[in-house]
Amino acid sequence: MMGRKSAPRDEVLEALLKFRRNHKWALEHSDKLRKYLDRFVAIDDGRILDVSDDEDEIYRKYGKSHGVYIHYVWPPDLVWMV
């Protein structure tokens, strides 16, 4: 049976750690993201790579980029009720 070749474990771990750093950056720099309200942003290495109104477009561009964090910028006063 022929299977899909997987990435080496170290590459996967590094991509996950990079994703985590990008996510943490987004949480810590919400003030920089505020101007992109109701839009999607792609973040890598502490910088905003791209901004889009179209979720499909931004995932098409960056969804397979290892470690890139894609974030939807919510209104800061949004209240979730469950």
Image (cartoon, grey):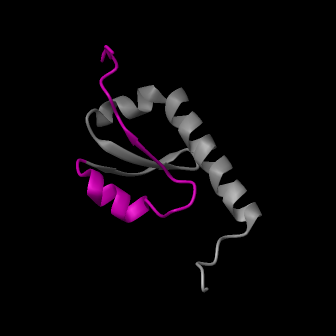
**Residue 7 pos. (x, y %):** 67, 70
The range drawn in magenta is 53-82
**Residue 60 pos. (x, y %):** 35, 64
Q: Residue at x 34, y 19 (%)?
A: 76
Q: Main secondary structure of the magenta part?
A: loop
Q: Nearer the viewer, residue 81 or 76?
A: 81
Quarter of the image where the N terminus is located: bottom right
Above or below, 56 relative to 82: below
**Residue 3 pos. (x, y %):** 60, 80
Q: Residue at x 43, y 26 (%)?
A: 31
Above or below, 47 relative to 61: above
Q: Residue at x 70, y 64 (%)?
A: 11
Q: Residue furthest bottom?
A: 2
Relative to 74, 15 lies left or right = right
To which quarter of the image does residue 77 belong? top left
Q: Residue furthest right?
A: 10
**Residue 33 pos. (x, y %):** 39, 34
Relative to 10, 58 lies left or right = left
Relative to 29, 58 lies left or right = left
Is 57 contained in the magenta span? yes
Q: Nearer the viewer, residue 59 or 30?
A: 59
